[in-house]
Image (tube, grey):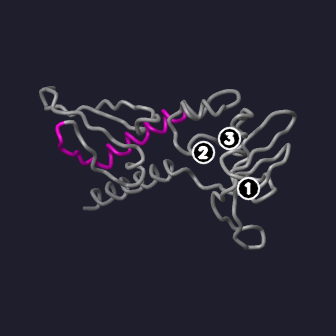
Amino acid sequence: MKYTYHRGSENSQECVDFDLRRENGDYITTCVVNVDLLICGVSQHPCTNDDAYDLSAEEQLAILRIIEQERSKITDKQGAKSLQDWNDSGLRTLEEYLRPDDEVTEDFVEYFVNIMPPTTCRSNLVQSGEPYSHERDENGHYRPTFDTFYKQDGVWRFAGWCFARERKNRVERPSRLAEKIALVEERLERYRKAENNG
């Protein structure tokens, strides 16, 4: 099956579509897979003929791999990432778009200063005003982490999700997409083992 990736935008969701065809190649319908719903575990997606198509685990994995590939083309951009680049990427969340140590432009940092009062706002360190997560510190206590940007040698970089007034990334979990790929791969492996033993 041929899958086509479409970036999200202000007016549309990130999606992958594909055509369903009969054995003789005649077109039946086009199905549209909403990326967010697929990552959340929804396997049934709408088609243009008002039917829904239930993706097999193999089809889910193939589509997830295409999403991973296409997102990498977006996120592996060379040079500083700007706020406009993020808007144009179609990726909704910061964790989908930035990786720790990515270079960012000043307007990216200003955005986080302006959307709500920052937790930390120094000339060389800016942290968002709302926690991203709560992570265990070296003493075993849970503390909030914040989207963190730091300036070094005149260049702003994304530090990751750090405790207040720090720039050490505290969130090492895989992305939601990577977690979903691992889950589907694990499920397929269990099916294969069950078939071989059955």
* Residue that numbered label 3 is attached to: 111
* Residue hosting label 1: 162
- N-terminal of the pair, mark 3 or mark 2, is 2
Q: State the CA–CA distance, disc 3 to disc 2.
A: 12 Å
Circle 2: residue type: Leu
Element on which disc 3 rests? helix
The foreground one among 190 and 29 is: 29
| Residue 145 numbered mark, or none | none
Identify the residue at horizontal 23%, vertical 39% (top origin): 47
In the displayed structure, would residue 27 be above or below residue 151? above
Q: Position of residue 8 (x, y in %)?
A: 45, 35
Mark 1 residue element = strand
Q: Is residue 110 left or right of residue 85?
A: right
Residue 97 lies in quadrant:
top right
Look at mark 2 in the image and give the residue it sits on.
Answer: 94
Neighbour tally class for label 2: few under 14, some 14-19, many 20 plus, Cα within 10 Å:
few
